[in-house]
Image (cartoon, rainbow, N blue to C red):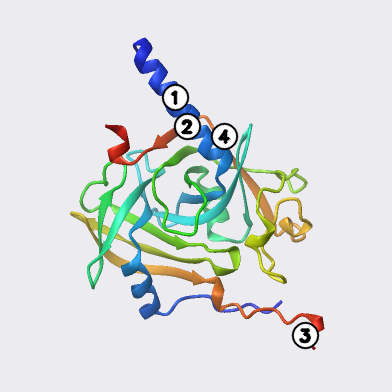
Amino acid sequence: MTGAASRTAREAQDRAHAILQAGTRGFLATRTAAGGAVVHPISVFHRADGLWMNTYLKSAKARNMIRHPAVAVVVVECGAGAPRPPGVLVRGRAELLPEDADPPPATVEPAYLLPGVTAPVPGDPIWSLNGRRRWFRVPLTDVTLLEATDAQA
Amino acid sequence: MPRHDVRMTPAEVDAFVQDEEAGVLAHLDEHGDPTAILVGSRGLGTGVALTAATARPLPPDGTQVCVAYEREPSYSGVRAALVLGRLAGDHVVVDRTISFDFGKIPAPVREDDN
C-alpha cells in the first residue's frame, strides 16, 4: 500500500470510528435456523472492546447469534428518517456476555422515551429484566466505512 | 405487563415500504455468514426496486435477502418492516414480511390522570 493509500485508509477508519462513537442506530444481520439472512433494527453502543447490543434471550436475534455467532452490523448516524450513508459495517463473532456484564454508560437522550414504556436504557436495571435480557458484544476487528457513491469520487 | 400486538397490517406494511427511500439489505456471503449493505429503495406498487447506496453492490440474482426499513422518531414510535425474499435483478420477489409499530402500544395511564 502506498503512503497516500495508507493515509486514505486510515482516514476512512477514523471516520468509521467517529460514526460508531456517535451512533446508536444499528441494524443486526444474522443467519436464521433455516439458513437465510435476516436483519433487525437494534440499538448499539460503542466501547473500546466492541459494539454492545442488548436483547431478549428468547428473541430471534439472540437465538440466531447463539446458534451462528458470525454477524454483520450496520451502524448509521442517529436520525428519525430512513437509514442512509454514511454508515459503518462491522463484521465479527457475537459473544454472549455474562448476566452481570457491566453495561455501557447511558447515551440515549431521555426525551427519546415516553413515560411508562419499558425501553431499555443503559444503566437502568430493566436492561436485565431478571436475566431475560442479555448483552452481546461484537469486536471491532472488521470495520468498513460505507460512504455514498458520490462521496467517493 | 400485557403484550400488545404491534404488527402492522399487510396494507400498512405495503404503504410503509412503498414510502421508504432507503433501507439495509442483508444476505449471506460465500461462506454462509451474514453481511449487509445500505440500499436505496423505490416502491413499485407490488414490490420494491433497490439500488446500492454505497460502493458495495447488490448481491447476485436469486440471492435470498432481507431488507429492513425503519423509522424511529422515538423508541415509542419506532416502525419497522423486514421484507424477506429473493433478488431478481434490482427487484425483491417477496416471500414474507415481519413488521412492528410501537405506536400501537397504548400510552400508559399515569396515576395522577385518575
Q: Which residue is identified by label 2? A: A15
Q: Residues within 10 Å of mark 1 (few under 14, many from 20)?
A: few
Q: Is residue A129 left or right of residue A20?
A: right
| Same chain letter for marks 4 and 1 | yes
Q: Which residue is identified by label 3? A: B113
Chain ID of residue with mark 1: A
Query: If you read the primary sequence from the N terminus, does the residue marked by circle 4 or circle 2 appear first?
Result: 2
Q: Is residue A51 left or right of residue B15?
A: right
Task: Kindly indicate the quadrant of the structure image that contains residue B34.
Answer: top left
Spatial separation of the CA atoms under disc 4 and disc 3: 46 Å
Q: Is residue B55 visible?
A: no
Element marked by disc 2: helix
| Same chain letter for marks 3 and 1 | no
Say what amino acid the circle numbered 4 marks: Pro
- Marks 4 & 3, CB-CB < 8 Å contact: no
Spatial separation of the CA atoms under disc 2 and disc 1: 6 Å
Spatial separation of the CA atoms under disc 3 and disc 2: 48 Å
Chain ID of residue with mark 2: A
Percent across and percent down for residue B32 are 38, 43
